[in-house]
Image (cartoon, rainbow, N blue to C red):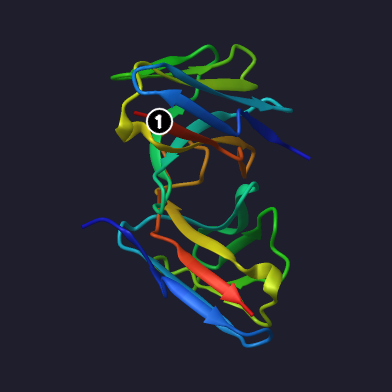
Amino acid sequence: EAQVTQNPRYLITVTGKKLTVTCSQNMNHEYMSWYRQDPGLGLRQIYYSMNVEVTDKGDVPEGYKVSRKEKRNFPLILESPSPNQTSLYFCASSPQLAGTPGDTQYFGPGTRLTVL
Amino acid sequence: GQQVMQIPQYQHVQEGEDFTTYCNSSTTLSNIQWYKQRPGGHPVFLIQLVKSGEVKKQKRLTFQFGEAKKNSSLHITATQTTDVGTYFCAGYRDDKIIFGKGTRLHILP
């Protein structure tokens, strides 16, 4: 089944404790992206990657890191989480550069992160 | 910077009434996509509009892209309880994607 998976789905952590949220897609998609969703603010792009070893900042990259060593995986790293990073995080992938006609974004199920 | 404004933020309708949500961009967009997110779920792609003035229909849903490619709308005819959720537009320009804040649709039985 074609899908985007994220782990963990739920995480409660404390300020400053490094964490990684994994994202994997089995559709051989080139484009992957991370979003955070907050009440009243909608979906905001954190980072995106157009292909292996190619990453770029979205609208809200501060406090986050990503890597794209393999096509299927795009982990999100919080080196020193803070309470303002408490949010719902979505990973997404699409066949090619987002915005090219026909490139639907497929979203993962989401990771709800709480930073105390 | 580039913004995509979406209105209204919330909409309550009686079941069977129509519903419309609007997106407006401060800049010309390459294309626009619409997504639906059910409560507790993740965004799911509905449609993409690319051409100026384009109109697409999916059963009771009608999507429009403005002539200037700066605005778009989603209209649902005769809403049903299955239409409950938040509808997002996402505008593309260059390599950037900007989501609207969404319109949350509540259906009153």
Image position, residue B98 (x, y; %): 62, 41
Which percent across, then down, holds residue B40? 41, 54
* Disc 1, SS: strand
Q: Callout 1: 10 Å neighbours few (<14), some, many (20+)?
A: some
Where's residue A58, x and y in %? 66, 55
Quadrant of the frame with the C terminus of chain B: top left
> Camera-side residue: A59 or A87?
A87
Relative to residue B43, is residue A79 depicted above or below?
below
Q: Nearer the viewer, residue A32 or B78?
A: B78
Q: What residue is shown with label 1? A: B107
Asked whether B95 or B103 is in front, the reply is B103
Q: Residue furthest left?
A: A1
Q: Tag 1, which chain? A: B
Where on the picture, by quarter, is residue B35?
A: top left
Q: Residue at x 47, y 33 (%)?
A: B105
B61 is higher (above) or lower (below) than B101: above
Image quarter hosting the N terminus of chain B:
top right
- Asked if residue A78 lies left or right of residue B74, the reply is right
In the image, A12: left or right of A60?
left
- Can residue A101 be seen here? The reply is no
Query: In percent of the image, x 68 and y 28: which residue is there?
Result: B25
Residue farthest toward the right in the current orientation of the protein: B1
Residue occupying the point 61% across, 53% down: A45
Residue B24 visible, this orientation: yes
- Residue B57 placed where, x, y %? 35, 17
- Residue B36 appears left or right of B71: left
Name the amino acid, label 1. Answer: Ile
